[in-house]
Amino acid sequence: MLFGLIHFSINNCHIITDSKKLIVFIIRLIHTNNLLTTMSTLQVEKYDNITQISGDLTFDFKEMMNELGDNPHCMFGDLNKVLGGSDIKEMELEDMLDLMKNGNTDAYYQDRNVWCYLCVRQNDLKNYMFAPCDSENRENEYNRLRGGVGSFAKEGFKIYLMH
């Protein structure tokens, strides 16, 4: 908890909030059933004035398809307005090949100032996000991130590089 705020990550979204908003957020997740479909595990721990909410990201592509986010995106807002902005680049085939071949080190993402890859299905703007900072994405030379981005591209999703 920094300056009375709580930082946590859920459903591929990093959230910073105060404790009252956190309770409302969790209630909304449970109410919309997102909590039950987005994480196989969810743990809430409290240490003095720090509340930690954690869970595991799936490595199963079929489960990722079940966990697609909605528009508006929880972090970026209305994707109709965001996609095509100056900090967002739609990945081309050369970019995808470069990611698959060379995206296995921290330096790769740092040198390119990668904040995340956003996989977007164009007909309904359903989406899935891969952030290099998530521990599951860093494991095994970024295998989850590279494989997930490739799988979404294969399914016809457009992949956007977010800086």
Image: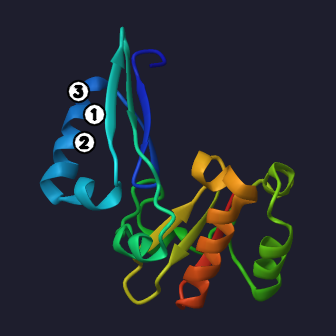
Alpha carbon of mark 2 to alpha carbon of mark 3: how far? 9 Å
Q: Are marks 2 and 1 in contact (CB under 8 Å)?
A: yes
Residue under label 3: 20
Alpha carbon of mark 2 to alpha carbon of mark 1: how far? 5 Å
Tell me which residue sits at (78%, 53%) in the image: 113
Q: Residues within 10 Å of mark 2 (few under 14, many from 20)?
A: some
Residue 121: give x, y in percent of width and height.
Answer: 46, 83
| Amino acid type at mark 2 | Phe
Element assignment for label 1: helix
Tell me which residue sits at (26%, 33%) in the image: 21
| Amino acid type at mark 3 | Lys
Q: Which quadrant is home to the C terminus?
A: bottom right
Indicate left or right for 126 with 100 as reference: left
Element assignment for label 2: helix
Q: Which mark is residue 22?
A: 1
Alpha carbon of mark 1 to alpha carbon of mark 3: how far? 5 Å
Q: Which mark is residue 25?
A: 2
- Quadrant for residue 159, please give it: bottom right
- Work out whether 128 lies above or below 123: above
- Quadrant for residue 33, please give it: bottom left
Q: Are marks 1 and 3 in contact (CB under 8 Å)?
A: yes
Tell me which residue sits at (40%, 90%) in the image: 123
